[in-house]
Structure formats: C-alpha cells, structure tokens
Image: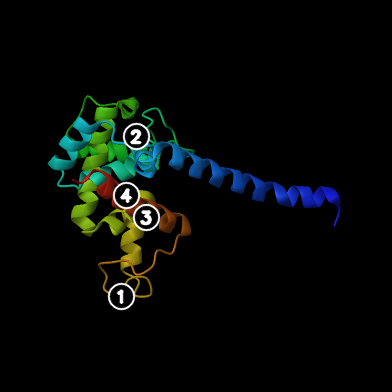
Amino acid sequence: MTHNKRKKRALPVVVSIVAVLLVLAAAAYFGYGRLLEALFPIKYENYVERYSRENGLDKYFVYAVIKTESGFRPDAVSDVGARGLMQIMEDTFDWLKFRQGDESAVYYDMYDPQTNIRYGCCLLGFLMEEFGDIETAAAAYHIGRGRVNEWLGDSSISSDGVHLDVIPASDTAHYVSKITKAVEIYKRLYDK
C-alpha cells in the first residue's frame, strides 16, 4: 500500500477522533445537561404548545420533528422542496389547506414559523389519529401514509396490521429512530 493511500484511509479516522474530542470538551466545559439543551432546544414554544394541544399531540414529539426536519431553521428547504420548520411538501400543504379551509394561505407561508407549525401539527395529529403511536406516525410523516398502510397490510412487516414490526426502508427506519430518541431526550430534559 502506498503512503498516499494510507493517508487517505487515516483521514476519516482522525476526523472522527477530533469530532469526539470536541464533543467531550464541550460537554466538560458546558456540562452534559447544558450541552444537551443546546443540541435539543425549545424554540417557538408558544406555537408548539398551542398547536400540539389543539391536535392532541405530545409537544415533545413536535419538538423532535422540528429538530430532526429542519434543526429549527424556518427557512430550511429540503432536496425535494419541502419547506420550513416541519418540512411540508407542496402537495401536503395543498391537502392540509383544503382540510383546514384556509383559502388565503400560499405555499410560501411555510416559511412562517406559526403557519408551518400549525400545518405540521395538523398533519401529525391526523397521522397519530390514524396510526395511534409515534413510531408509525413518524414513519408516515417521513415516507407517506400510503406506503405505511401498505406495510401494515404485509404480514412479514406487521404481524398485527396495526404496528410495524420492521421498517423496510432504511432511511425511514433511521428517521423514526432519530425521532423516538429525540422525544426521549426532550422529555428527560424538560418534562419536570
């Protein structure tokens, strides 16, 4: 093996070690709890509280979705065009707009934190009502309710037709894992 190839192989390892050391240094400096609070913030509290309550949602589920989807950036746009804090797609926006009878809203409004959280909570409330648990609702939020309903109808994926035993799409499985872990962290940090 040439010297350059060894250098190229070593670089990712060195970067990983430096990243871990930086996280450990930040945890030591700020304290682990403060570091977690910085990584899992509470923002847009009035909107999250209001719309999670109106839609029968656990507010920490909403915070977890916002953190995972946009990192609390209201101007976020995904590779596929989803917008805002909760990353609403245009066709989903149109469906929610019709469902809410909100004739004055336009897709650009998804950059407005209050409107985005209202629409996102409406969607999450609908998905929780349909699927009944955070994991399945989060999967539907990520990949679509049609796909999740297909999975629930497949006995190799869902033994009871209600809960997913496995999530066959790795990106959706990863997303659901991130959401559930974030909900746990939010509850541990802020549910006093």
| Residue at the image position 38 percent from the left and 33 percent from the top | 83
Dot placed on the residue nearer the N-terminal end, 2 or 1: 2
Using the rendered image of the protein, determine whether residue 58 is visible from the camera's viewpoint.
yes
Dot 4 amino acid type: Ile
**By what rule are the colours in the image chosen?**
rainbow
CA neighbours of label 4 inside 10 A, class few (<14), some (14 to 19), many (20+) = some
Q: Which structural element holds mark 1?
A: loop
Report, in whole angstroms, how far the alpha carbon at label 2 lies from the one at label 1: 34 Å
User: Which numbered marker is on residue 185?
Assistant: 4
Number of marks in picture: 4
- Residue denoted by label 1: 159
Which corner quadrant holds the N terminus? bottom right
Report, in whole angstroms, how far the alpha carbon at label 4 lies from the one at label 3: 14 Å
Evaluate if marks 4 and 2 touch, with contact meaning CB atoms under 8 Å apart. no
| Residue at the image position 47 percent from the left and 38 percent from the top | 26
- Residue denoted by label 3: 176
Is 99 placed above or below 105 here? below
Dot 2 amino acid type: Leu
User: Which numbered marker is on residue 85?
Assistant: 2
Dot 1 amino acid type: Ser
Dot placed on the residue nearer the N-terminal end, 3 or 1: 1
Evaluate if marks 1 and 4 touch, with contact meaning CB atoms under 8 Å apart. no
Is 124 placed above or below 110 here? below
In-image side of 106 versus 99 (left or right): right
Q: Nearer the viewer, mark 3 or mark 1?
A: 3
Dot placed on the residue nearer the N-terminal end, 3 or 2: 2
Using the rendered image of the protein, determine whether residue 97 is visible from the camera's viewpoint.
no
Report, in whole angstroms, how far the alpha carbon at label 4 lies from the one at label 2: 19 Å
Which corner quadrant holds the C terminus? top left
Dividing the picture into quadrants, the one containing residue 135 is: bottom left
Report, in whole angstroms, how far the alpha carbon at label 1 lies from the one at label 4: 29 Å
